[in-house]
Image (cartoon, rainbow, N blue to C red):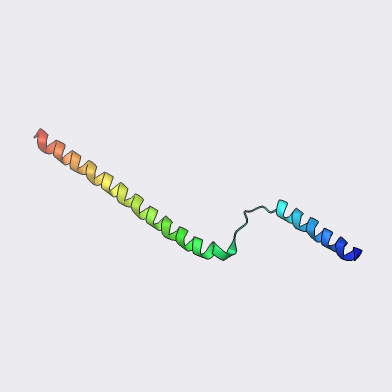
Amino acid sequence: MSNAMFLLMLCKIGLRRKLQTFPGKMVNTVYSDEEKGSQDKESKEETILAMLGIIGTILNLVVIIFVYIYTTL
């Protein structure tokens, strides 16, 4: 019985050391595929919305410039 307890203590200490020195963050593999897919989708949507915002801003500036030129002539 004492050998089993000693082995269990060694495993516990080894696991504790491994968790303390783990360089990355721990990932739950059950949800990682679903979360990765949704994060990719959200990232793509954010990129599209950002591009639409930039295009809209540029078009607004062009309209303002044309209206300024038209009214000053």
Considering only vertical position in the picture, is 1 above or below 23? below
Residue drawn 59% across the image and 61% down it: 28
Residue drawn 73% across the image and 56% down it: 18
Q: Could you tell me which quadrant the C terminus lies in?
A: top left
Left or right: where 63 falls relative to 14: left
The furthest residue to the top: 72
Left or right: where 52 falls relative to 42: left
Residue drawn 69% across the image and 54% down it: 22
Left or right: where 68 falls relative to 36: left
72 vs 28, nearest the viewer = 28
63 vs 49, nearest the viewer = 49
| Image spot of residue 1 (x, y percent) | 90, 66
Residue drawn 80% across the image and 61% down it: 11
Residue 21 shows up from this direction: no
The furthest residue to the left: 73
| Image spot of residue 7 (x, y percent) | 85, 63
- Count of numbered circles on the image: 0
16 vs 3, nearest the viewer = 3
Left or right: where 73 falls relative to 44: left
Residue 52 shows up from this direction: yes
Considering only vertical position in the picture, is 22 above or below 8? above
The picture quadrant where one finds residue 30 is bottom right
41 vs 58, nearest the viewer = 41
| Image spot of residue 61 (x, y percent) | 23, 41
| Image spot of residue 70 (x, y percent) | 11, 38
Considering only vertical position in the picture, is 21 above or below 37? above
